[in-house]
Image (cartoon, rainbow, N blue to C red):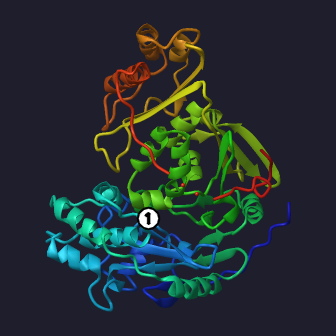
Amino acid sequence: MAQATTPASRPIRFVLNGETREVSDTLPTTTLLDYLRGPERLTGTKEGCAEGDCGACTVLLCEPDGDGGIARRSVNSCIQFLPAMNGRAVETIEHLGRDGPTPLQVAMVENHASQCGFCTPGFVMQLHSAWLTGALTDRQSVKDVISGNLCRCTGYGPIVEAGLELAAEPVPDTGEADAELSTRLTELEGEGIFAYEAGGGRWFAPTNVDDLADTYAAHPEAILVAGATDVGLWVTKQYRELPLLIDVSKVRDLMMIEERQDKVYLGASVTHRAAQAVLGSIHPDLGEMLRRFAGAQIRNAGTIGGNIANGSPIGDLPPCLIALGSRLFLRKGDDLRILPVEDFFIDYGRQDRAKGEFVAAIEVPRLGDDQRFFAHKISKRFDSDISAVMAAFCLTFDGDVVREARLAFGGMAGVPKRAREAEAALVGRPFDAAAAGDAMAAMAGDFSPLTDMRATGGYRLKTAQNLLKRFQLEQAGAVSGRIAVIGPQALDLQAIGGAA
């Protein structure tokens, strides 16, 4: 491992509504929203929830796509830290319509798609982002796009109609302007590790995995941050002081996707948006689960590695990865360690990760012809809600007999966990009503779920049992299945420090 040197602090340099900004005296944990509404006085961007749920703070984030163009995505500015904007461009509601009303703004007005107006800038920025990225195709796509925007005036109907009108408008050709912006942002970002220090706080942003490993080994007390969809709330809700953060969102080696015949590899910094298509190609239920994973803005920012590393007992993805028999690649310095995802979760708030060690990649097996998979999320609200129960099952068959059973749940214990007694009740038997009934009964020995604001313990257990019954009925043909999705890139496993 190379000897880590501390790079000199540089100003945060980014583009805001077309103009270059340099910031050198703001605490690293200052959110983009506070900067916009404070020093910039851009008050069209609203604070509603300060946790990435309501979408009132939505802005458009632009960055070089690696091919000389620009990648665009909507994000919640309330949980994005300002140093993460270095080398990126931000557009707010004030930038829209600077040369006259856009097709979206016209459609919003003509459809009376605003009531009290507080949430409207967020809806407009979200629909604008989706239009530019080609995500608006039909009524369902409009609904999916605004799943992370809340309106308490019940004004969704006119907003959906405005979105549909926008979907019919041709997307402008921005190729030449994008090439210029890409060059500009690359120059602003600078080379090597971006370091920023102000107000007693420090921020490092490496761009390759070796620099990340060296920096984290030298500063194992640092907090790793990618999309900030969890860490952002530590500041906005818990008011925690985070004196040192390492941003992994620009580590190119961790943003790759590699599809093989029998496996898929995802770098830890791959966003849920980028992973949706490739995971959906493994099984439609995985794609459908990610369609319901938080809201679009969170999927645009939150990462696969972050969802695993934070160890939440109600994370939606870990039960699916556990059921599929996925493995984690963890790196510390020059050393790479591989372990099953299920072994990573030790107890509530505890994971098998040493100081200075980070999740580098995830290996997800594809299903064999002898395997059957099921994943289903139970929540109070269909879109943008936290699970009460997340279930994922994978059965391997010898003919009609279950050879191996992997039944994994979120929300049932302090960690994502397999139902071992229920699994044992299925192995060596046909997957029929009798076997499912025995496994459902055995599940009571696997879990003693808690009661909280999302569900009672009794409801959780009954729901978990019924989801297994649903799987059995689906396999018997008594219940129809669900939906699918598609698309993506290439992960160099040597680059992260190991081989498959």
Q: Position of residue 103 (x, y in %)?
A: 28, 79
Residue drawn at (49%, 41%), measured in percent from left and top?
A: 286
Vertical order, 483 against 470 (above or below): below
Which residue is identified by label 1?
Answer: 79
Give the left or right position of residue 232, taking residue 215 as reference: left
In percent of width and height, residue 458 lies at: 33, 22
**Callout count:** 1
Q: Depth check: 116 or 139 in front? A: 139
Residue 410 visible (yes or no) = no
Task: Identify the residue at image location x=51%, y=63%.
Answer: 241
Residue 98 shows in the view:
yes
Residue flagged by tag 1: what amino acid is it? Ile
Q: Secondary structure at mark 1?
A: loop
Q: Residue at x 30, y 38 (%)?
A: 453
Q: Residue 134, position in %: x, y?
A: 42, 67
**In screen coordinates, is 311 left or right of 103?**
right
Q: Compared with residue 20, is residue 438 higher up or lower down, i.e. above or below?
A: above
Displayed quadrant of residue 368: top right
Against 204, is 443 above or below? above
Residue drawn at x 56%, y 61% as measured from the top left: 226
Judge whether 386 appears above or below 84 on screen: above
Q: Position of residue 380 (x, y in %)?
A: 28, 40
Task: Pick the residue in front: 128 or 311.
Answer: 128
